[in-house]
Amino acid sequence: MKLGFRCSEGSDNFQNALQEVIYAEEQGLDSAWVAEHHGWDIIWPSSHMALAGLATRTESIELGTSVTLLPQANPVRLAGEVNLLDQISEGRFNLGVGVGWRESEMENLGYDFEERGARMTDHLKAMNALWEDDVATYDGEFVSFEEFELTPEPVQDPHPPVWVGGGVEQALKRAAYLGDSWFPVWLDTIEELEPMYEKFDGNVREAGDDPSERGRPILRVAWVDEDPDVARERLQEFFDRLVQNYRDRNAMIPAAMQEAVNGDFEEFADGRLIYGDPEECVDRIEEFEDRLGIDHMVLKLYNPGVDHEQMMEFIELLGEGVIPHLGE
């Protein structure tokens, strides 16, 4: 089981993120991740620029996007950036991709929100064509190119792993046929994920591959504290702030998040979130491993209201109290 985390992001947080990722590498964490959003101060507009900076100051920790908004990117340019980032990190990059969910963001970037699913599929096919052929030609619905030579070459063969995000049936098919792994939506519970993984595995077999050869990553919101009651209280406060943040931006609030604010928080959190003292966090992480076969868990530690000092405490607790006990 690999354990990664989402570091501080957005605004003027790069130096904080750099300190956190360097410390996480020292503490034995396996990976560090950042997201992408535009016009939102808690997320940077270019995860790849941030990761390139982090790559130059680290040696072993894997780096990844959680996620790159693929329908909003030119796939030809993105494939080249991915290869370059794999070069800068010396083969430590993982590409997580998703369709996006903020309509205003996508429309302001000049894309039709209703086309995001079709674009996601087309862009994945285009990138695969670029990676598969030395000189590639592709004629798709939204992008076409002829006799294009992608440079530079990536370090990882044939390319950095592509984790395809999403929570609908079409996302499972994209992940199976066009990606390397499925990267589930963080709001789904273990019970909800079990039949979805069965469908994903079936799609992988139909694609001619063995599901056991595919990675099993997952993203989970987390809070770890020496006092489990504090962890639960802080996590509930975070969801209160997050829902309010969505309301302030007139963004769609998922029904499950409404339950976290209006209902029984512990019932909402069970099988969905990683929280508690280090021992409880180990148990919750291992439940995902035992029931779903998860082999790489990314903890979303940075959220509105979490400062750099708190992030450093999280990393220390994970390094000293969680990582040594995983798999015992």
Image (spheres, rainbow, N blue to C red):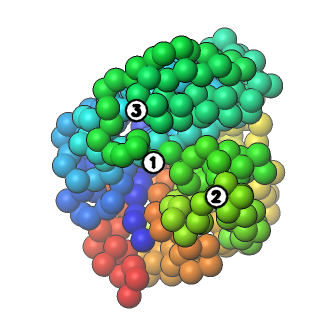
Mark 2 vs mark 3: in front: 2
- Type of residue at label 2? Gly
The mark found on residue 161 in the picture is 1
Q: Residue at x 34, y 23 (%)?
A: 151
- Is residue 44 shown left or right of residue 249? left
Relative to the observer, which residue lies in front, 234 or 81?
81
Residues at discs 1 and 3 in contact (Cβ within 8 Å): no
Quarter-of-image position of residue 277: bottom left
Quarter-of-image position of residue 235: bottom right
How far is mark 2 from mark 3, CA to CA? 26 Å
Q: Quadrant of the N terminus?
A: bottom left
- The crowd level at tag 1 (other Cα within 10 Å; few <14, some 14-19, many 20+) is some
Q: Residue at x 24, y 42 (%)?
A: 90
Q: Which residue is mark 3?
A: 82
Relative to the observer, which residue lies in front, 119 or 31?
119
Q: Which residue is mark 2?
A: 208
- Give how far across and how far down residue 187 sits, in percent: 68, 56
- The crowd level at tag 3 (other Cα within 10 Å; few <14, some 14-19, many 20+) is many
Q: Earlier in the sequence, mark 1 or mark 3?
A: 3
Relative to the observer, which residue lies in front, 216 or 110?
216
Instruction: Kindly state the secondary structure of the residue where label 3 is placed.
Output: helix
Q: Residue at x 56, y 15 (%)?
A: 145
How far is mark 1 from mark 3, CA to CA? 10 Å
Res 197 visible: yes
**From what the image shows, is residue 322 above or below residue 101?**
below
Q: Residue at x 74, y 29 (%)?
A: 118
- Type of residue at label 3? Val
How far is mark 2 from mark 1, CA to CA? 18 Å
Mark 2 vs mark 1: in front: 2
What residue occupies the far bottom of the structure in this picture? 328
**From what the image shows, is residue 164 above or below residue 71?**
below
